[in-house]
Amino acid sequence: MRPSRRTFLHLAVGAAALPPVSRFAWAQTYPTRPITIIVPYPAGGGADAVLRVMVERMRTLLGQPIIIENVSGGSGNIGTGRVARAAPDGYTLGIGNWSTHVGNGAIYALPYNVLSDFEPVAMHQIFYLMLVAKKALPANSLKELIAWLKANPDKASHGTTGVGGQGHLAGILFQNLTDTRFQHVPYRGISLAMQDLVAGQIDLIFADTSAVAHVRAGSVKAFAVTAGRRLPAVPDIPTAAEAGLAGFSIANWNGIFAPKGTPKDIIGKLNGAVSSTLDDAGVARKLVGLGSEIPSHEQRTPEAVAALQKAEVEKWWPIINAANIRDE
């Protein structure tokens, strides 16, 4: 028996009055399936290594598998673009840092906005650069390296993750401070540059924490770190200031970002998982051993990451534009 028109309209009005499934409801049950975190660099780099230490604990806390997907190329822009285009449901996240979420916005014509198209989740790593060179380079200290570079202008090759990456800018700053000149050789990721450095195909790198293992193995020479104090992971390597180059201090960071519009409750759950992971003594010990510094609780919050990113954009974009650094 078909319902009367009056009954049909009554049912329709009643159905319309029911609340739709909201983003709040998603957050209440999140996560219910595997989470993918995109690393915008090849496997083996510092960002990749740190995340692989963290995900084991995060999987337990969130109750779902976490898949790491390495999407390299474009100085990190290809993988970062994948995150920007993903559904804002908490199931596709990305690793971001100074290069991907600050510098690249001033250097490349991007199809996304580094400030407004992402939701910061948490900062999970602070790290410093390390100046390393191939073993055959005829210098055994930073002063000797500078002297050799001055005696051989434009002969040395400098591997980086691409134009405008922090390693590239570190090289420019180093050349300005030391009155030296060397060639820029961009790679798809720092791990690929490191392979060529170990093989003797390039001369030097301003590397991330991925250099620590190679320094310990004796496969590269290390001259200085860009930190204000020596790193516990490699205490025998002096700071640049200790080695005779005052003013050469550079810090970087890695954080997790979600697409714009991801519900705040989901961001909160993810932030809690990251922060709890960093508080785990075993995880922290491994990260410090990789050359990382653990961010404080205040530095880990989404609000703190957003404020840092905005401040870095305001500081660095005018500098990058004044130097006319653009995609080659």
Image (cartoon, rainbow, N blue to C red):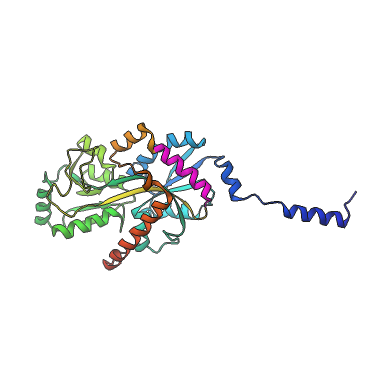
Occupied quadrant, residue 283: top left
Where is residue 188 drawn, in percent x and y?
A: 34, 51
Q: Residue furthest right?
A: 1
Q: Is residue 147 left or right of residue 21?
A: left
Q: Is residue 27 left or right of residue 105?
A: right
Name which residue lies at 18% across and 55% down. 247
Which residues lie in the magenta part? 262-277
Name which residue lies at 28% across and 47% down. 193
Question: Is residue 326 placed above or below 54 in the rendered structure?
Answer: below
Question: Does 275 lie within the magenta span?
Answer: yes
Main SS of the magenta part reads helix
- Specify whether residue 194 is in view: yes
Q: Is residue 229 left or right of residue 25?
A: left
Where is residue 310 drawn, in percent x and y?
A: 37, 59
Question: Is residue 56 placed above or below 305 in the rendered structure?
Answer: above
- Specify whether residue 123 is in view: no
Q: Is residue 309 left or right of residue 29?
A: left
Occupied quadrant, residue 306: bottom left
